[in-house]
Amino acid sequence: MSEAFLLGAAAALLWLAVVLVLLRLSKRSPALIVVLSAALVYLAALLASLALAQRVAFWPFSAAYGFLTLCVLMLFGALYKSVSLRMLGDLSLAVGHALPEQELLARYIEEDSFGRRVAILLKEGHALRTAEGLKLSPKGRRIAAGIYRLQQAFAIRASG
Amino acid sequence: MIGHLDFTAGPAVVVALIAAALFPAVLAALSRLPRLRARNALQFLASSVIVVALWAIALCFPAMRASSAAELATSFMILASALTIYLEIWALLSRGYTLGLLLTLFRGEHPMSDAQLAASYRQGEGVGWIMRHRLGGLLSAGLVRRQGDGIVLTGTGAIIGILYRAAVAALALKITG
């Protein structure tokens, strides 16, 4: 069983190396790169284990790989999407580690995060820009309806 | 068994899979308790504690006991992985910024200008809410403090900020937040 743990940990390390290279070389979405490569490396490791001479326990291998990659994915998600962490990063660059509150808020609301997220909705085809303004595409409406139902199921009143 | 791949699951592994499958039902039930209403983080924490406790109790029964330390570790990693996946989904549903914009357009039912979308965000609280909410979180965690009209990093906040920038550089991320 400990061989399965080692194999899982080795596959997770391989995935991390693949991610570090792909993030530098590929122009695709970093989120897509890390998630897709995690699944591909897992499948590749499973296939490779079929060729090994000795028995590999599926559950310990999968548990070790899944646990390690998910720990990294969680950290990656925080680094990639967290507004709070970005505020700390920006403040650490400012003179005296300080910024006026209004400047800090405006920077994200008007100049950066909001506009970028609207651009993502447009680029992914979830929303359309018409003469009357932004509106949901049929695809965006379907996704939003699904998310709305999930929020209702878990009594989540609003996201953000 | 396929080739040399052994799919045999011990009782502790089965217990972890059942506990992981139970989690959404526990969370859905707890999120309806009046005392936990609108407290998403607390709902998730309470559900996790209940499911982990049930998992630990189940493993004490002789029929479900792990046969080795390795099986116990496997069982723990399966449950921890499942809870991490649920946490990611829960965070997206309850804290997702882009998702919030999508839902604002969905609820609006008519086209909106960028300014209207920003003002209608989070059922009329406006897009400024998210920044005030995140800044409030940083202030209460002691990572930043107010100084006159400004926001200043504390010692811990500065360390996290520097580590964050180092990690972003190491991962070659061009755009974050």
Image (tube, rainbow, N blue to C red):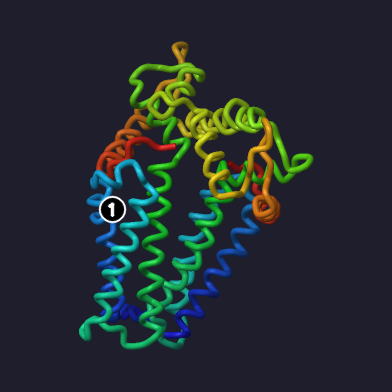
**Residue drawn 44% across the image and 42% down it:** B95
For numbered disc 1, what is the local secondary structure?
helix
Instruction: Report x, y in % for residue B1.
Output: 31, 81
Most foreground residue, A87 or A12: A87
Q: Which residue is mark 1?
A: B27
| In this picture, residue B84 sits left or right of residue A76 | left
| In this picture, residue B170 sits left or right of residue A138 | right
Instruction: Report x, y in % for residue A47.
Output: 44, 72
**Residue drawn 45% across the image and 78% down it:** A49
Most foreground residue, A10 or B28: B28
Dividing the picture into quadrants, the one containing residue A17 is bottom right
Dividing the picture into quadrants, the one containing residue B174 is top right
Q: Residue furthest right?
A: A95
**Residue drawn 45% across the image and 67% down it:** A67
Please determine whether, in this image, residue B58 is positioned above or below residue A114. Answer: below
Most foreground residue, A49 or A104: A104
Instruction: Report x, y in % for residue B35.
Output: 28, 46
Q: Chain of mark 1?
A: B
For label 1, count other residues whose C-alpha is less than 10 Å away and answer few (under 14), some (14-19) or many (20+).
many
The amino acid type of the residue labelled 1 equals Leu
**Residue A136 visible somewhere in the drawing:** no
**Residue drawn 36% across the image and 88% down it:** B68
